[in-house]
Amino acid sequence: MRTRRLKISGIDSTYHVMTRTVNGERLFGDREKEVLRKMVWQVASFSGVEVLTYCIMSNHFHVLVRVPVLGKVPDQELLRRYKVLYPKPTKYQTGTIAVMGQTLAAGGEDAEVIRRKLLVRMGDVSEFMKAVKQRFSIWYNRSHGRYGTLWAERFKSVLVEGKGNPLQTMAAYIDLNPVRAGIVKDPKDYRFCGYAEAVVAHAPALKGLRAIWADRLGAAKAPEKKALEVHRELMFGERANDRDVAAPERERLLQALEDDKVMLPKASVLRCRVRYFTDGAILGSQEYVRGFVDIWQEQKGRKHPPKANPMKGADWGDLVVIQGLRKRVFG
């Protein structure tokens, strides 16, 4: 599968990844979204990546994921991760797990083969997405008597600076997907996103939210209530505590955004489709983005180095992107 991911090795990295169904067909109801939600968390636990937030819609899904450098994984942990993929194992799967455990315990070349096969599937965002999409495709086609490809060929990927304003703004944009789609007025009312799961105290979602706001709150173990408060402030601006937040007039915003010099409140612009967050290639501070210019140029085979372009439309703080997206930035 071809992807648009910028390949970074040797350092922890954070990506916003998004993928769509074939032809953008709206195939997912609540049941399908629930199954996909569970698979995202399961595969993340297997892969050793950290889901910071996510959103599942009727024809696509977004995940903001931190991928740590893969170090040595003990055999016991390898076996635990493998079991995560099969919460209700069949007799065959139970037997396979037992044999795998015995082989790892015995050591030798057979154990090394198992380790290599498992480790190659871990610590990589492409492998994470591949596993999620393949597992869900199998379930979906079996459940609906369907054959053939479920997903469009590629998934989009943006490398995101994994701290501060870039990370927080990207997370808010992802959580606001159902608001932009007009499904809900408040993402807390949409079950299939990270913010809603954090509101109802789902431990992995709360852990992701604390990690997103760790810089501002001082530590990843900052109070959960405070992490929820500051995330909500970013999404809703001055109306963060309104019980019924009305959606802004989308057409009026889009017309205003056609003026390159206009500056609107960040919370308002986040309710529009902003291609910087899905097609910007690299998003972060000037220093962060410039640090990857050479890598991006080499991997894309470009003759000239790209520019770090300031984002338009709102006061984004220190945010810049490596692709300026001259046409149809907002929509």
Image (cartoon, helix red, strand yellow):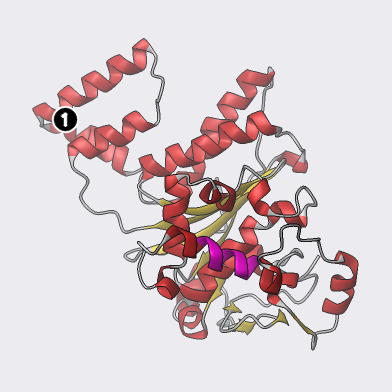
Q: Is residue 48 above or below residue 164?
A: above
Task: Residue at 47% x, 74% y: name it.
Answer: 164
Q: Position of residue 196 (x, y in %)?
A: 59, 49
How packed mark 1 is, by other alpha carbons closer than 10 Å (few <14, some 14-19, many 20 or more), is many
Residue 297 in sight in this render: no
In the figure, residue 224 lies in which quadrant? bottom left
Q: Quadrant of the C terminus?
A: bottom right
- Left or right of 279? Residue 11 is left
**Left-right relation of 293 to 274:** left
- Residue 8 in which image quadrant: bottom left
Q: Is residue 230 magenta?
A: yes
Query: Residue visible at 64% across and 63% down?
Result: 173
Q: Position of residue 288 (x, y in %)?
A: 46, 79
Identify the amino acid type marked 1.
Leu
Residue at the disc numbered 1: 104
Q: Main secondary structure of the magenta part?
A: helix
**Magenta region:** 228-235
Q: Is residue 60 above or below residue 99?
A: below
List x then y, in percent, for residue 238: 69, 74
Left or right: residue 329 versus residue 14 is right
| Position in image of residue 181 (x %, y %) | 78, 52
Nearest to the observer: residue 6 or residue 207:
207
Helix, strand or loop under label 1: helix
**Which residue is depicted at the point 31% across and 16% down?**
94
Q: Residue 142 versus residue 36: which sits nearer the camera?
A: 36
- The quadrant where residue 317 appears: bottom right
Residue at the bottom extreme?
A: 261
Up-down relation of residue 42 to residue 159 (above or below): above
User: In terms of depth relative to the viewer, which is nearer, 55 or 330?
Assistant: 55
Assess whether residue 110 is covered by the magenta stretch: no
Which image quarter is the N terminus in? top right
